[in-house]
């Protein structure tokens, strides 16, 4: 089995050699500055995106691009440290990145997407790319539908919650402080807000029941996300040309 490579570690000559075979170009997309409650770091999504990309690299002969660490995250802008790009900017970052690399003969791109609001600019980017450039991306909602029905216990949530905290306990337990984990965000609707009555009120920035998280749950979630991504990438390249075995 041939492993992949990180683009940033190559010289341009080595990159040209890798590009000859038109490998899938994998782009991790995860915020390096987005609130995830009191128990998870601002770079939570960046950690997940890089972890998934590395697991993919170890299994497939792909090229991993550098992390894109900012995108469209409007639901979190009331919490200090959170950065959100305009949707159009987030879309154009993807379009320009893929177009730049496509000029060297690459035509298959996969985004290791770790957000939900990012789905909109990603869908628009896919439509804007030139014909002949294939773009696919991880859709968390779709991927997580494959989880066992009895895995998660929380009654509500989608951010810094049982699922996300469990995943982090599996892949990067050293950055999780479970003594600060809590259940929050059950009131209201819309974007997360620290002002009661104006949206989905959450004093902590958590939406869900993070106290239910465990590393064992995180291992299952990680496997589901990774397998979903591997299947999508294999579909981009064609099963006979790119497979993990």
Image (cartoon, grey):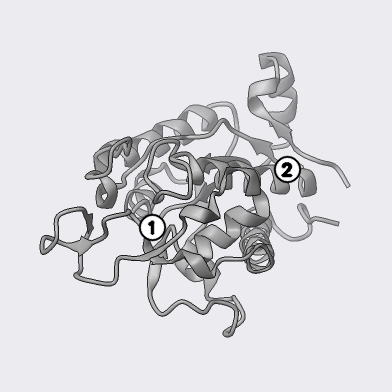
Compare marks 1 and 2 and give the one earlier in the sequence.
2
**For residue 192, above or below residue 105:** below
Q: Most extreme residue toward the left, as rendered?
A: 197
Q: Nearer the viewer, residue 159 or 143?
A: 159
Q: Most extreme residue toward the front, as rendered?
A: 179
Q: Are marks 1 and 2 in contact (CB under 8 Å)?
A: no
Callout count = 2
Mark carried by residue 203 = none
Q: Most extreme residue toward the right, as rendered?
A: 1
Q: Most extreme residue toward the bottom, as rendered?
A: 150
The image quadrant that residue 159 belongs to is: bottom left
In the image, taking residue 46 as reference, residue 188 lies left or right, namely left
Q: Residue at x 58, y 43 (%)?
A: 175
The quadrant of the rendering that contains the C terminus is bottom right
Q: Residue at x 57, y 84 (%)?
A: 149
Q: Position of residue 82 (x, y in %)?
A: 32, 39
In the picture of the structure, the residue carrying the numbered disc 1 is 116
In the image, taking residue 52 as reference, residue 132 lies left or right, namely left
């Amino acid at each position: 089995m041939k492993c992949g490579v990180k683009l940033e570690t190559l010289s341009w000559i080595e990159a040209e050699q890798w590009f000859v075979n038109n490998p899938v170009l994998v782009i991790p997309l995860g915020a390096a500055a987005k609130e995830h409650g009191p128990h998870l770091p601002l770079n939570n999504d960046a950690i997940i995106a890089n972890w998934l990309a590395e697991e993919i690299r170890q299994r497939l002969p792909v090229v991993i691009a550098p992390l894109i660490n900012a995108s469209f995250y409007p639901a979190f802008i009331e919490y200090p440290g959170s950065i959100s790009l305009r949707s159009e900017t987030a879309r154009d970052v993807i379009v320009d990145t893929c177009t730049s690399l496509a000029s060297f003969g690459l035509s298959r791109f996969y985004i290791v997407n770790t957000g939900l609001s990012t789905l909109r600019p990603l869908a628009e980017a896919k439509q804007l790319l030139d014909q002949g450039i294939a773009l696919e991306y991880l859709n968390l909602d779709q991927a997580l539908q494959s989880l066992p029905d009895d895995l998660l216990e929380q009654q509500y949530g989608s951010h810094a919650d049982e699922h996300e905290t469990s995943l982090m306990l599996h892949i990067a337990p050293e950055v999780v402080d479970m003594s600060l984990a809590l259940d929050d965000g059950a009131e209201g609707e819309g974007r997360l807000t620290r002002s009661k009555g104006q949206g989905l009120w959450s004093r902590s920035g958590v939406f869900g029941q993070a106290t239910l998280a465990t590393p064992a749950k995180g291992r299952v979630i990680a496997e589901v996300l990774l397998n979903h991504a591997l299947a999508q990438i294999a579909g981009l390249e064609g099963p006979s040309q790119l497979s993990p075995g």
